[in-house]
Structure formats: structure tokens, C-alpha cells
Amino acid sequence: MKLSRSTLDILKNFSTINQSICFKKGSQVSTLSIQKNILGRCVVEEKFPRDFAIYDLSEFLSGLTLFNDAEFDFTNDSYLTIKDSRNKTRYFFADPSVITTPPDKKVELPTQDVCFLVSSTDLSNIIKAAGIYGVEDLSVVGNGSTIDLVVRDKKNDTSNSYAVSVGETDSNFCFNFKVETLKLLPGDYSVVVSKHNASLFRHATLDLEYLIALEPDSKYEG
């Protein structure tokens, strides 16, 4: 089998969530951060023929650059054979027991309290602004009128901030994230936030989603 450009991009993104990954037989690929606060799940074009684990996903992906149109052979139980017309390597599987993995059962939000759409441009600007102003907090704020994404230092009322409006609401809330948890593949997203400190980001064009935990000081007044 071969891996599409789209699947390689998704795996590169997942490597930023957890350096290790367990593949399951079939088309669904998922990952869970060591802190268990970010879960990524995607249905890819390919169907993997077996379960296997990779300890260093970034290393694995970097190794693929040695090949021109790499093909993957899963015949051996201990390693993956990667080859093209002239080159060949064996890449040994890892022990799945040492890797933090998502639960087999799909995780659902306990409630769906706030929903909005956010564009790729707005997400990029939010992350860029956090870097420019040296702040680590992202708040989804509802003031009974608009839904705003605000990057700031939530512990400092005089910190620099950047905000973008992404919707309307008649509720009041402040859902807090750490900017570093927004390890999202670029794209537009539909976002659902639960008052039980969890959120779901769904990609607009791919069968890709991320469950991201909120900070415990988040508040929802309804």
C-alpha cells in the first residue's frame, strides 16, 4: 500500500500531539496526548491491514523522505518494509503497551452548550497573535450578544489581547483553553463546547476531529 499526501499531512499533525501512535486495522487513525487533554481522530483514504505501533512518528515520517513513491509491506509481524524501485528499509514496530492511546469507544461530549464556526484564517491569526503578544490563554467569551475568541493573559487585566468575533449568542460564558492545545490541521472548523470542560473541533472538508479539554476555571452561566 501507499500513503496519500493528505494522510501524511494528518500523521505529521498527529505527531505534534503525541510522538507515538498505535494504528488499528482499518481506516481510522487516532492519537491521544500524554496529558490526555487532546484527542485526534481521522478516517483516512487507506485501509491499514493490521494493528501496529510506531514509537517515534516524526522519525518514521522523516524516513519516508528517503524514498520516491514509497510502498509499504506489512507481511512481517515485527517490522514494516518500506521500499521503492531502488531503496528498501525495515522499520520495527513498537510495543503498544508503552504508548498512550485513545479509548476504543468513541468519546462524545456530555452536552453541547455553545456552537460556532471558525475559519482557517481566524485560527491562524489567533495563534499568531498569541505569539506576537507573548500570551498563552485563549478564551471563548459570550457576553449575551457575540461569541468572541480572545487571546490574552487571563491573570493580567492589563495584558495585550487580540479578539475575533465568530458568532452570536444570548448566553454568558467564558471557556478557557491553553493556546498550545490548538494542535489543529489547517482548515475551517465547526466547534462545539460543553460546559463540562470539553470541546470538539470538526474539520470542514475532512473526516477529522479533535476533542480538546478546557481549563478548569471555565464558566457557563447560560
Image (cartoon, rainbow, N blue to C red):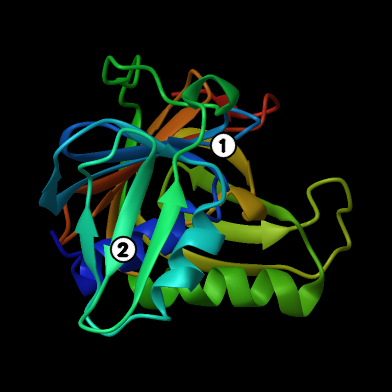
Above or below — where is 85 with respect to 30? below
Q: Residue at x 48, y 25 (%)?
A: 96
Q: Could you say whether the residue bearing mark 2 is in a helix, strand or loop?
A: strand
**x%, y% of residue 6?**
23, 68
Q: Could you say whether the residue bearing mark 1 is in a helix, strand or loop?
A: loop
Q: Residue at x 21, y 33 (%)?
A: 50
Q: Residue at x 47, y 22 (%)?
A: 195
Residue 153 or residue 212, whichever sits in front: 212
Which residue lies under the disc numbered 2?
82
Mark whose residue sits in front, 1 or 2: 2
The three-letter code of the residue at mark 1 reads Ser
Which residue lies under the disc numbered 1?
33
Residue 26 or residue 117, whichever sits in front: 26
Q: Residues within 10 Å of mark 1 (few under 14, many from 20)?
A: many
Residue 203 lies in quadrant: bottom left
Left or right: residue 30 versus residue 36 is: left
**x%, y% of residue 152?**
74, 59
